[in-house]
Image (cartoon, helix red, strand yellow):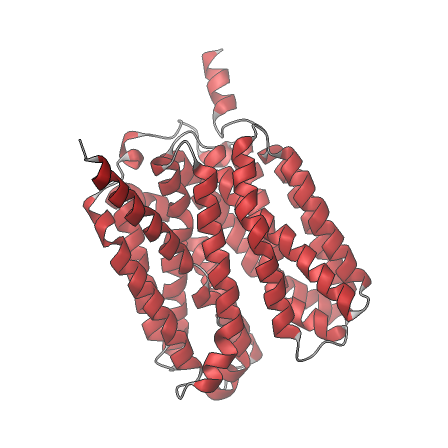
Amino acid sequence: MPHPHNKKIQSFWLITGIIFIAFNLRPAITSVGPVISSIRAELHMSNGAAGFLTALPLLSFAVLSPLAPKLGQRLGNERTLWLGLVILLIGVLTRSTGYTAALFFGTALIGVGIAIGNVLLPSLIKHKYPEKPGIMISLYTTSMNIFAALASGVSVPLATQMNGGWKQAFLLWGGLALLALLIWIPQLRHRDTANQTMKLQSSSIWASKMAWYVTIFMGLQSFLFYSSIAWFPEILRSHGIDTATAGWMALMQFASLPSTFLTPVLADRVKQQRGIVAALASVYLIGLCGLLAGGSHTLLAIWMIIIGIGQGSSISLALTLIGLRSENAQQAAALSGMSQSFGYLLAAVGPIFVGYLFDQTHSWTMPIVLLIAALIVMGAAGQGAGRDRYIFQSEKQRNSA
């Protein structure tokens, strides 16, 4: 039996490792948007190619998310997460060489590496901390969002000040991945056996209504988040904001941090999360309706903050629901793979469709109306996902009848 002091040390390194993996799940993506014009000019890329570059990680997420649980089942979650960090590091190094082919190939590898972390961290947390998943999801999602906002905010200053421009700025995030790799090494001695010893019910998870509620909620919050990251700067410019746009986008992302942290803690303390869903959807709706109405620069700043609160709550609640609606780590991995596969497919389509609507109407009214409609459907799915029920509970009840 491990000595209590050794258990504390092991717990410290595990929690630190989870936090540092979370640090790496967004910067390699959010650092691209602010410097995409520089990349396009230097490599003589078309707008279509530039758009595909920003969607490529999301497509990797969609393809790899259902496969990550199977890889975790074969290798163990700890080793698979380490492998994901290795792939992420290779992707960052490849992308930073500056060649067009390497840029796309490295970006695809980055998507693969991050997809593994996206899917398996909720499963690992479910297994290691079954009694307190809320606080761990809070730490994980808040850490992820902090570096997502940081990478978005510092990309242009770093690219401007460094001799290598955007290539050297991208390379810095390889250092963060390397640090996470080193911190995670103690976990390689362990092998999470939950995936081998616990099996899903006989029916596919894709047949579970509860799994679909969680999946639609996850998918539409991803649709809203990535659509806003792609197009809110242009929407703000249409309201007369120019040089302050980047700062206002960072304002939205940093405003999400308190709600990102608090939502899972609150969700873990109540049996049903339907009230939380209604509250966050209402706040989110106020922000989007305000953005639709426009107003002064002060009002627009308020709308961005309110939207940030809604976004922070929705992503952390979506990840929390994966654990709360699962009975074990294997179910959590399968539900995470399903919800994130569908979710990131929607996330990849979202910015493209929003841009298409603008091209057709030459106005941001219909694109924002589309986001409002997606939010309403997300809220409805959240009402189903927020019920106190496991993904296979209804099947169990039928089988025992």
170 shown above or below 345: below
Q: Give the total number of marks visible in the rendering.
A: 0
113 shown above or below 382: below
| Quarter of the figure with the N terminus | top left
Residue 62, image x and y in percent? 46, 54
Residue 161, image x and y in percent? 45, 86
Q: 279 and 15: which one is in front?
A: 15
Residue 95, image x and y in percent? 37, 75
Residue 310, image x and y in percent? 64, 51
Whether residue 279 sits left or right of residue 28 in the image: it is right
At horizontal 44% and vertical 38% (from top left) the residue drawn is 133
Q: Can you name the residue that lies furthest to the top here? A: 401
At horizontal 32% and vertical 30% (from top left) the residue drawn is 198
- Please indicate, yes or no, whether residue 105 appears anywhere in the rendered image: no
Q: 386 and 307: which one is in front?
A: 307
At horizontal 30% and vertical 34% (from top left) the residue drawn is 194
281 shown above or below 272: below
Q: 167 and 363: which one is in front?
A: 167
Whether residue 13 sits left or right of residue 350 in the image: it is left
- Where residue 308 sits, quadrant-wise, is bottom right
At horizontal 80% and vertical 65% (from top left) the residue drawn is 294
- Please indicate, yes or no, whether residue 338 appears anywhere in the rendered image: yes
